[in-house]
Amino acid sequence: MADKVLVTGGAGFIGSHLVDALLAAGRDVRVLDDLLPQAHPTGTARFLSKDAELVVADIRDRGAVDRALDDVTSVFHCAGMVGNGQSMVEIRRYTDVNAVGTATLLEAMLARREQFARLVVSSSMVVYGDGAYACKTHGVVRALRPEARLRARAWEPVCPTCGEEVAPVATHEDQPLYPTSTYGISKRDQEELSLVIGRAYGLPTVCLRYLNTYGSRQALSNPYTGVAAIMTTRMLSGKPPTLFEDGGQLRDLTHVSDVVRANLLAETAPDAALYLPFNVGTGRSVPILQIARMLARALGVDIEPDVTGLFRDGDIRHCFADVSRARELLGYEPRITLEEGVGELAAWARGESPEDLTERANQELRDKGLIR
């Protein structure tokens, strides 16, 4: 396989770690990134290696994408807007960047289809909406969280048939997709576009569904980024992290190094892996209240989270991964424990001075009636 690769969004959190791994493997790396201020407040590609070629442009700019694809044989598509909450306000922007941006990349690749050996697309757990649940009577079901229950502060989902509360179970890739936010819809569209068009044209494509990626270089000043980063920023500012509902929501935090390794495995995976989505997680479910307390200990602060008892539209209750498909077809195995990963994030974050914009972001959602 030739050595030149393109990483879209390669100056960002996951992308820059991926670039480092590719460079360490002796690859020639080009990056296409628009250096969005929300993710790059300094206006520079702060974490991008100088050994990578940087093209500063929007993924929706067909001319720039064409130029970025010159002499490339593999593409890692990490570019996109991230964040459930903000996506419920900036509906068109999220849809445009994530879906139309991916369509632009696909059309540019198809114009020179024979050039490419692999397209690896960064998807997300948000495509599921809520995770998988099992009813004692009716088995695995599409659980419901009626608004009346949320207003009554009854947080656990119920069976659509009998109305009894259901228990969360590991979510497999065959779980039906019912995204609950604009972000989730846009990622579902991105993923399905890539897999359907890839199969139709014989463009070898693999999609990776990340479960709550966290670690160093996450955009701490972005109040719509991952849960671990948002909580870290609050505590670095001496403030309690804001937790919605009762803090019992289960999440599967996956360290960025595991996500990077999954990308590398997906590039060289056998044909049996083509045109499939893969969960990239740990399979471990942890309440976010426990995660917040682990972060506080790692940061060396005595701050207890603010459990608000409020709910936010677009949020889900529980989701953690069944990674058996990735284990079987990619050879993926999560390596970083939550304790190790939280320690790595905290050690890096202690040297940062992020601006805490969480309260402003939450106020915007309250003004729209999306937090109540």
Image: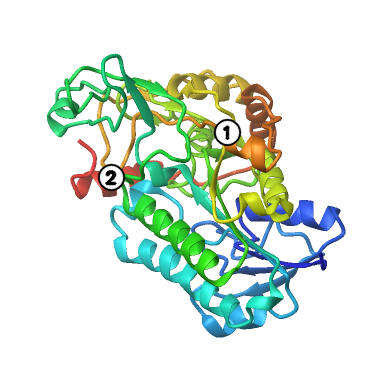
The answer to whether residue 349 shows anywhere in this view is: no
Decide which of tag 2 and tag 1 comes sooner along the chain: 1
Which numbered circle lies on residue 315? none
Q: Is residue 364 left or right of residue 352?
A: left
The residue carrying pointer 1 sits among few (fewer than 14), some (14 to 19) or many (20 or more) residues within 10 Å by Cα, namely many
**Residue bearing mark 1:** 323
Q: Where does the image place residue 207, in percent across and percent down from the top left?
A: 55, 53
Q: Quadrant of residue 281?
A: top right
Residue 308 spot, x, y in % from top left = 29, 26
Percent from the top left, x then y, of residue 295? 56, 25
Give the foreground label among 2 and 1.
Answer: 1
Dividing the picture into quadrants, the one containing residue 371 is top left
- The x and y percentages for residue 122 are 56, 54
Q: Give the quarter of the figure containing the C terminus.
A: top left
**Which of these two is toward me, 286 or 195?**
195
Kind of residue indicated by mark 1 = Val
Tell me the element at label 2.
helix
- Indicate which disc residue 363 carries: 2
Kindly tell me whether residue 266 is visible in this rendering. Answer: yes
Write the residue at 69% across / 25% down. 340
Which sits in the foreground, 63 or 222?
63
**Above/below status of 230 relative to 269:** above
Q: Quadrant of the N terminus?
A: bottom right
